[in-house]
Amino acid sequence: MQYLKQTDPVIAALIEKERNRQDKVLRMIPSENYASSAVMEAAGSILSNKYSEGYPGSRYYEGQQFIDEIEETAISRAKQLFNAEHANVQPYSGSPANMAVYLGLLGTGGRVLGMDLAAGGHLTHGAKVSFSGQYYKTAHYGLSRVTERLDYDGISKLAREFKPQIIFCGASAYPRKIDFAKFAEIAEDTNAFLVADVSHISGLCITGEHPHPFPHADIVTSTTHKMLRGPRGGMILCKKSLGAKIDKAVFPGLQGGPHNATISGIAVALNEADTPEFKIYCRQVVANAKALGEKLAEKGFKLVTGGTDTHLLLIDVTAANLTGTVLAKALDQAGIICNSNKIPFDQRPANDPSGIRIGTAAITSRKMKEGEMKVVADLISETAKNIDNENVIIKIRTRVSELCRSFPAPGIK
């Protein structure tokens, strides 16, 4: 950052502090990961200089010869990797991608069925605080009180009663596999479009660690960071018959010029994901999550649904007489970064819920395996037991730093 240090030493110093933080802590928020140096080089390139309203071959500005090739490459790679008929890589992130789906399929009003936020869904799946719950009539499905898993019979019953035009499936805090085929049956029965938001599990879907949303879903949306380890962007993949509607909704419906540098970073990340090494990585992510969950359960932590099939764990911490916020803040001080999270049927408020959400995507990018998961479980347990003991927390942070030193973070060193 030689030029930045000269031009703006304040920002340069803050970026360096954040770099050091990412290097020395266990980043376990499920939506975070490490992008490669190649991805970051593309995303921070001179492509930020170019303005490119429109789509390849149909731009409103000149000088697009190479920009078109870059976006076409990203589109081609997305279609191949996800076995999609059509792809749009221009959404600025996952939420704008979902917004484009609403606009493209329903316009400015309609009926949408999505997973309840408190059950593990996402804001843009119809939550009342989101645009999706304010401009569309929404209903929400949840989980079984007995199994804490998706109740497909209940979802089917609700869909027949509510008669949605769109059904959203996919989650941000649900640790089990999603049966896209069952969702497709429900959607067909109610004449609804099925939209699968795989932002959290996209990498698992394309490597066979999780069922694939195609051919069951009409539309698939995803962020391009998280498991894909790309820059912060979004994608919409869909059947060819819906491509024109989606493209028109993204531009000019919601956005102006696309972020060309980001799209180039997406192209690089998709290329990296289309490798045997990425398949090994995704397999290890799931293995690590399972191993970590087993060790935490042995130490008395209650795992929502009893475990995980994916990259994340949702943990009820009430048995330890803690709240999710209290434990998440203590873990932060110890160098273990997660987030507080509501658990199914939680009676506590969202700003101080009963659970924490932990993921293994980023630490697996550091090449950690099952053996390290035992160490991580020990560190989490010790933090929970010594939450008010500052000296112990400091010692745990030192041990975390030592562990991280043994497993360098990609893109950092």
Image (cartoon, helix red, strand yellow):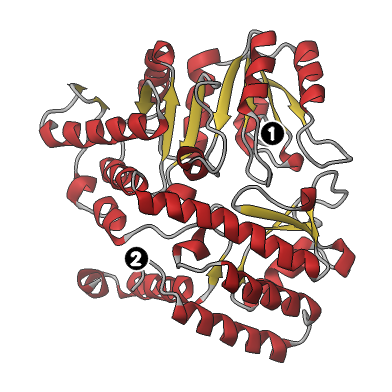
Work out which residue is located at the far bottom of the displayed protein and give it: 391
- SS category of the residue bearing label 2: loop
Q: Are marks 2 and 1 in contact (CB under 8 Å)?
A: no
Taking the spot 39% from the left edge, 14% from the top edge, the residue there is 240
- SS category of the residue bearing label 1: loop
Graded by Cα atoms within 10 Å as few (under 14), some (14 to 19) or many (20 or more), the crowding at tag 2 reads: some
Reply above or below: 181 against 244: below
Residue 231 visible somewhere in the drawing: yes
128 or 362: nearer the viewer: 362
Reply above or below: 366 against 225: below
User: Any mark on residue 252, and which?
Assistant: none
Taking the spot 77% from the left edge, 18% from the top edge, the residue there is 156
Give the CA distance from mark 2 to mark 1. Answer: 35 Å
Residue 359 visible somewhere in the drawing: no
* Earlier residue among tags 2 and 1: 1
Residue 309 rendering spot, x and y as whole percentages:
65, 47
Reply above or below: 230 against 199: below
Residue 352: quarter of image: bottom right
Taking the spot 47% from the left edge, 31% from the top edge, the residue there is 97
Question: Which of labels 2 and 1 is toward the front?
Answer: 2
The residue that label 1 is drawn on is: 127
- Going by the numbered disc 1, the residue's amino acid type is Ala
Q: Which part of the image, by quadrant, shows the C terminus?
A: bottom left
Residue 61 rendering spot, x and y as whole percentages:
16, 27
Is 136 left or right of 229, judged from the image as shown?
right
Residue 37: quarter of image: bottom left
Graded by Cα atoms within 10 Å as few (under 14), some (14 to 19) or many (20 or more), the crowding at tag 1 reads: many
Taking the spot 68% from the left edge, 84% from the top edge, the residue there is 393
The residue that label 2 is drawn on is: 411
